[in-house]
Image: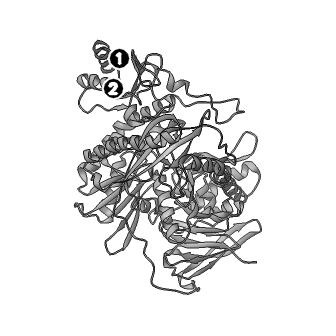
Amino acid sequence: MIGIDTGGTFTDVIRVDDDGSIRLIKIPSTPTDPAQSFLDGVREIGGDGDHGDQVVHGSTVGTNAVLERRGAGTAVITTRGMADVIEIGRQARNDLYSLRVTRPVPLVSRELRFEIDERVTAEGEILKAPSAAELGALAELVAASRAETVAVALLFSFLRPEHEQAVREALRRRLPANFPISLSSEVVPEFREFERTSTTVLNAYVAPVMQSYLSRIDETVESTVRIMSSNGGSMTIGQASSFPVETLLSGPAGGVVGAFEVARAAGFDRIITLDMGGTSTDVSLCDGEVQRTSEGSIGGYPLRVPIVDIHTVGAGGGSLASVDAGGALTVGPESAGADPGPAAYGRGGGPTVTDANIVLGRLSADRPLAGRMVLDGNAALAALGGVAQELGITPQQAAAGVARIANANMEQALRVVSLEQGHDPRDFTLVAFGGAGPLHACELADGLGIGSVLIPRMPGALSAWGMLSVDVTRDYSRTAMRELSDTFEEEIARLLGEIEQDARRDLEAVGLSAAQAIFSASADIRYQGQGYELSIPLDAPDGLALEERFHAAHLRRFDHSHPDWPTEVVTLRLRAAIPARRPEVEVADTDGGPDASHALLGETTLMADAGEAAAPLYDRDALLVGNLIAGPAVLTQTDCTTFVPPGWVGRVDEYLNLILERASA
């Protein structure tokens, strides 16, 4: 089994053989040709390329296409009068008091928005169907435009998809074969016009890029390749080509799944994940299970598909430090990226959080990054020296300030997914991974009162590991918009039966066995008049009626409920999961005792408020079960570096995780 996670700087490749042996490599990503690093990784990790290999892949190709606006020229076809939905949006503002509010430029320019005379009511009644002549004329207009892909989002098409299907047939008769056409009734058959249109546009916008990328992989690699999806499952290449919008958060989703699987095996099922990479940090709270949501955004554009509930901030190892016009030190959200990268990369970049960690002695410039890249400690010091000069302090003080500000940004993100959601972070274990997460984890735990931190065995490649731990999944939904009552609860089974029939047909169409699928259902429920919903599982074992479970969930989430208020089911959801082969977390069979001196590499000099202090430097890969590490200490390994501050003690558990806790007084 091979897991491949392509990031902005490195591509992580992990291979698990049938005997349980594990091999990990990190190779430079190839942003100009993303498929190349995937193919290089398969070749270097030792995949034999036959059908016995199973490859699961998470990629940022679609994500970067949106963030960098490098998607295809997209046209959108809407009901007459609705062409500006994607620009009007909603009145909500992320920063309520900002005097300089900016909104993302729509992905579809005004001249590529086409309208058609058709109308379906909110009850699903067809008031006007498009004529054949108008459909033909529309196809001619699209063909004459510069569009490379089309999104079709007609009013209330989630109730009656016939008109969207007619538009697609007209376009296919006029446009080249394999021209990408995305229908909102297939991408996201739900109400909320703005979000549905935006999601369909995103699907169309990245479709040509993703299809080209995936087809090259499919044609080159003989192994079975699955693509990580944003919902924490995986999908076939064919499904990912048709619905690429469902892969936009695949990498972070793999990390959360991997963190939860590793933590649960180690005895922790209430965790907060911290995935700090080069550009951003992703955090997620898992209270007994991976949390999912159907609402998100990317690049400021609403995304209405099932995704792992992740909050992202612009704080990563490559986040740039600078002094603003008021003389204050700032960090991020701008990033040095992979090229030029931090100053220590020797390409003229920086100063960044990575450079600050080098100056503070937490990241060794004497050891190649990812086993490949030689770091330049003098360049890092010079870059921080420029910031220090503007502030009138020493480079070491500037580096400490950069680290504190980066921590503050990440701490705020951790508060969003815990305290702001009604959870006390002190009841959870922080699981830190990514290339830089373990460098900051203990200090973040201190700030939130979290008592324990888990650093997985391979923290820098946990997303790739997580991708090997997911089933093949597909999510389906249907807007119901009906008052919840005993009568409707009886009707739910009939509606879900219809959705399940569609799901079985879809699975068989892409070569999957519907007979192996395990189905789970949920309902989005709200009090009548609310503008938001809670997703309630239909198969919960608590014995309560669906409406009672909604009231209980509302009380937990918002600290109030109203059993006497009328409720309504907004959307029914069904997940189809086909169990996939996954690696087992191996238990180490050697107890090394508390003494970790055999893993000692030497000493490093740490910078602190009190000045310089010597600290032991350990080889993390040489640690054995039962070894104890007392802070301050630095642990280095191929894919990551861990910083253990003073007052923290770490022990190696039977899975070779490092469990860090505050030392007893």
- Which residue carries the number 1 mark? 129
Assess whether mark 1 and mark 2 are in contact (beta carbons under 8 angstroms). Answer: yes
- Which residue carries the number 2 mark? 162
Left or right of 609 in this view: 244: left
Residue drawn at x 71%, y 42% is 324
Left or right of 638 in this view: 566: right
Q: Label 1: state its secondary structure.
A: loop
The percent coordinates of residue 473 (x first, y second) are 38, 51
Tell me where residue 608 sits by quadrant.
bottom right
Q: Earlier in the sequence, mark 2 or mark 1?
A: 1
Q: Amino acid at mark 1?
A: Ala
The percent coordinates of residue 660 (x first, y second) are 62, 72
Residue extending farthest top: 133
Q: Nearer the viewer, residue 606 or 165?
A: 165
The percent coordinates of residue 591 (x first, y second) are 50, 86
Residue 67 in sight from this viewpoint: no
Q: Label 2: state its secondary structure.
A: helix
Q: Quadrant of the C terminus?
A: bottom right
Tell me if residue 629 comes above or below residue 154 in the rendering: below
Q: Amino acid at mark 2?
A: Glu
Tell me where residue 651 sits by quadrant.
bottom right
Residue 193 in sight from this viewpoint: yes
- Using the image, tell me which numbered label, if any, was put on residue 615: none
Tell me if residue 554 comes above or below residue 627 in the rendering: above
